[in-house]
Amino acid sequence: MTALGFLYPGHAAEDDYPRMEQLLGSDIRMTLVHTEIPETTATGETGEAARRVDALREMGSADRLTAGVEELRLSGAEAVVWACTSGSFVYGWQGAHEQVRGLARAAGLPASSTSFGFAHAVREIGVRRVAVAATYADEVAGLFAAFLGDAGVEVVSVRGAGGSGRAAAEVATWGYDQILALARAADHPDAAALLLPDTALHTVSHIPALERALSKPVLTANQVTAWEALRLSARRVNAPRLGTLFTKEPLVQV
């Protein structure tokens, strides 16, 4: 049994995790603990404030992350991943490293974040040039592109949502057609892979279809979060229904 722990902000697409647990096999268990979102982001129906840089930094603060660590430790988790892309890359490359080091110390476990999951997953599938399809404000999407650049990944196209970006509650309702439209709008002929960085998007059921439509690997936030936890636990799982990322050698067959 491999037990994996995740800290997930608020409520949006968390049901992607039990779906991935089913696809990965009976010997992998995923425990998800919800972290609190700052009160200032809960005002108003749109939730757009949650996409501001200052709110994202608060969402990823040490106090908010460590509050859920004890529950994950008691669950028997072998590794913990902060399942939030924007709440990690907004700290920059060095700050995101400090964030996961603090999480590892608090948990007494190997730790990482979705942002580093993307950096490691891009390397895993052997590409250097990517396109980014983000639901964030343009400013925030640009910070993700800069983070990837620090990881040695060339971002040839990045598309944000403009303005304040899309609220998590909104994108959590998106279906395949809306996600594909976003991906197509951001794609670029020079990009060897397409990245969808928002953990609020329900993407797990759509990855193979997206890869067929775009004719290239697609990396999505919840997918790479699960993969990163497995990487920390020294597990490799062959699960083609989770996309190209889960078909790389060496394989452990489900």
Image (cartoon, rainbow, N blue to C red):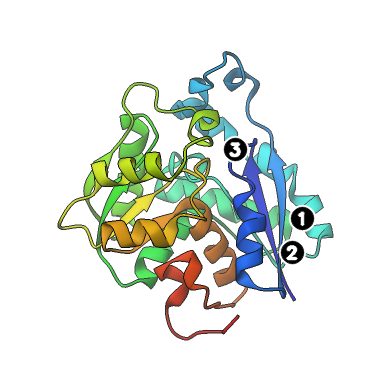
* Residue 13 image point, x, y percent: 58, 43
**Outermost top residue:** 44
**Dividing the picture into quarters, in which one does residue 112 lie?**
bottom right
Q: Residue at x 53, y 40 (%)?
A: 200
Q: Residue at x 67, y 56 (%)?
A: 18
**For residue 89, above or below residue 164:** below
Please state which amino acid type lies under the numbered disc 1.
Answer: Leu
Q: CA distance from mark 2 to mark 1?
A: 6 Å
**For residue 5, above or below residue 91:** below
Secondary structure type for disc 1: helix
Q: Disc 1 designates what residue?
A: 72
Q: Earlier in the sequence, mark 1 or mark 3?
A: 3
Residue 97 seen in the figure: no
Is disc 2 in contact with disc 1, using a CB cutoff of under 8 Å?
yes
Is disc 2 in contact with disc 3, using a CB cutoff of under 8 Å?
no
Mark identifier at residue 12: 3
**For residue 44, above or below residue 71:** above
Q: Disc 2 designates what residue?
A: 77
Is disc 1 in contact with disc 3, using a CB cutoff of under 8 Å?
no
Q: Residues within 10 Å of mark 1 (few under 14, many from 20)?
A: many
